[in-house]
Amino acid sequence: MDEKPKRIVLSEEQKRSRRARSIAIALALGALVVLFYVVTLVKGPAVLNRPL
Amino acid sequence: MSLVSEGTEFAGSAGYGPSIASVGDYVALMKPRVMSLVVFTALVGVVIAPGHVHPVIGFTALLCIAVGAGAAGALNMWYDADIDAVMRRTSNRPIPRGRIAPGEALAFGIVLAAFAVGVLGLLVSWLAAALLAFTIFFYVVVYTVWLKRSTPQNIVIGGAAGAFPPVIGWVAATGGIAVEPCLLFLIIFFWTPPHFWALSLVRVDDYARARVPMLPVVAGPEETRRKILLYSIGLVPIGAAPWLLGYTQTIYGVTALLAGALMVAFAWRVRRERDGERAERAAHDLFAFSILYLFVLFAVLLVEGGVIGRAV
């Protein structure tokens, strides 16, 4: 019952690439938030009026 | 609690362990060169559309179209990984190299496609978003999954996917459709076969090894050269159509006719040079010129700006 689960050790390269990917995802999400904010400012009340 | 801390060391994506993919690998998965052409043609669709588009809205539309194209590229690389692995031109792509696992590419493509379509719909236009969704579907399912491996007409019909971006740009700017973006669609649609067949003449061994039924593999180089010439001749009036129908200024008409004549000349050279290095060079030159052809025509339209829209 005391058996520890097998875990993964990341190599330095894997850690570096994971960190770079995480930063890229964070930047993309941040950019998306800024984009929604700016478009809301630009459209004003018309933001809810989207042509089909 | 994280399981990624101690114990067994894993090899990387190829061994389905923790990923070693860099951000650059994911960028490569989106086919950035194709994306740049898509963004350029979509930009022309936005700029020539009548009326005023706020730069932020125009930028958002182009960003979503670019990301949608990238998603389609990633899904194409996911499905075609087996073909890519045996072709010299594509064996260096992230999946065949073992940098990105196929499942990661699939998830990446689906998430990007959903974001591109969703954001375009929410912030710009749902009609444009629907067209973008259809374009991704057409490229991935109709072209990649169905046509590419089953018929030598694959890039003729599949070329429609690459022809949609200026239409999406126009719809994003105006909220509706018109004759002018349909003409731009036709130009890219008829430009695609001679462009890709010129490339496939050079890479015929690659396609044969990968069992992709490109026209030179199935019908032979001679028939391919004949069809390249026919499509190039047909492209001349289609390229000039926006001017012939009165939507652009004379400078576009003259440019389109001159560029079209050069395209036919390059295609004629491909038809004439049939053997050895000269034949390969002729096909390569046509491939290179065809890119310039499309760029020049759309660049002139871009410079003319909203002239097409105002002529309506």
Image: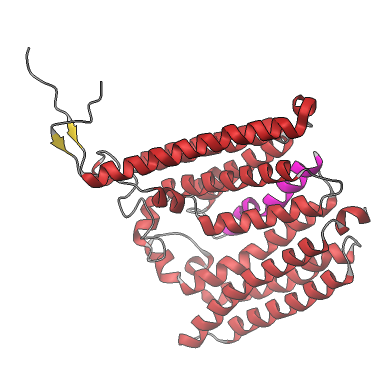
Looking at the image, residue B14 sits to the left or right of residue B127; the answer is: left
The percent position of residue B114, horizontal first and vertical second, equals 55, 34
The image shows a total of numbered marks equal to 0
Residue B154 seen from this side: no
Residue at 76%, 61% (x, y): give it: B302
**Magenta segment boundaries in residue numbering:** B155-174
Task: Identify the residue at image location x=58%, y=58%.
Answer: B155
Where on the picture, by quarter, is residue B288? bottom right
User: Is B66 a magenta residue?
Assistant: no
Q: Residue at x 53, y 35 (%)?
A: A30
Task: Decide if residue B63 is in sight here.
Answer: yes
Q: Residue at x 13, y 32 (%)?
A: B7
Q: Residue furthest left?
A: A2
Q: Is residue B174 above or below residue B295?
A: above
Nearer-the-camera pick, B206 or B109: B109
Quarter of the picture holding the N terminus of chain B: top left
Q: Main secondary structure of the magenta part?
A: helix
Residue B158 magenta: yes
Q: Is residue B110 above or below residue B170?
A: above
Image location (x, y in percent) of residue B108: 45, 39
Where is residue B278? Give x, y as percent. 51, 87
